[in-house]
Amino acid sequence: REPPPPIELKIRATGELFWNGMPLIKPAPEPQLEIEAGKDPQPQLEIDAEFETEYQVVAEVLAIAKNKGMTKIGFKNMPSN
């Protein structure tokens, strides 16, 4: 089967989240991540964090994704701090 297209989860330095370009309200990624984690095959989650984003924000999003069952997680960018 053809794998589904990846999901881009952008994290702005302000802490704002964008799901495939659409703004999210915290903790909005949880229901979407749960739905996506249940798909077979599961889509890749691409986390794209702006350079100035606090690492803690990225860690929280990553923890939510893992808790919801996402196993295919990649990173486009990561903050340096």
Image: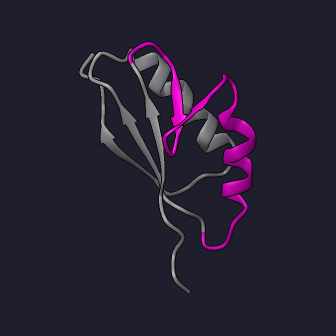
Q: Position of residue 80 (x, y in %)?
A: 24, 21
**Camera-nearest residue between 33 and 56:** 33
**27 drawn magenta:** yes
Residue 52's place in the image compared with 28, above or below, is above
Res 43 → quadrant = bottom right
Q: What range is drawn magenta here?
A: 13-41
What is the total number of numbered labels drawn onto the structure image? Answer: 0
Name the residue at 49% across, 58% down.
44
Q: Where 40 falls versus 17 (above or below)?
A: below
Which quadrant holds the C terminus?
A: top left
User: Where's residue 41, x and y in %?
Assistant: 61, 73
Q: Quadrant location of the N terminus?
A: bottom right
Query: Depth check: 48 or 59 in front?
Result: 48
**Is residue 27 shown left or right of residue 75?**
right
Query: In the visual, does 26 lie left or right of 56?
Result: right
Q: Is residue 38 magenta?
A: yes
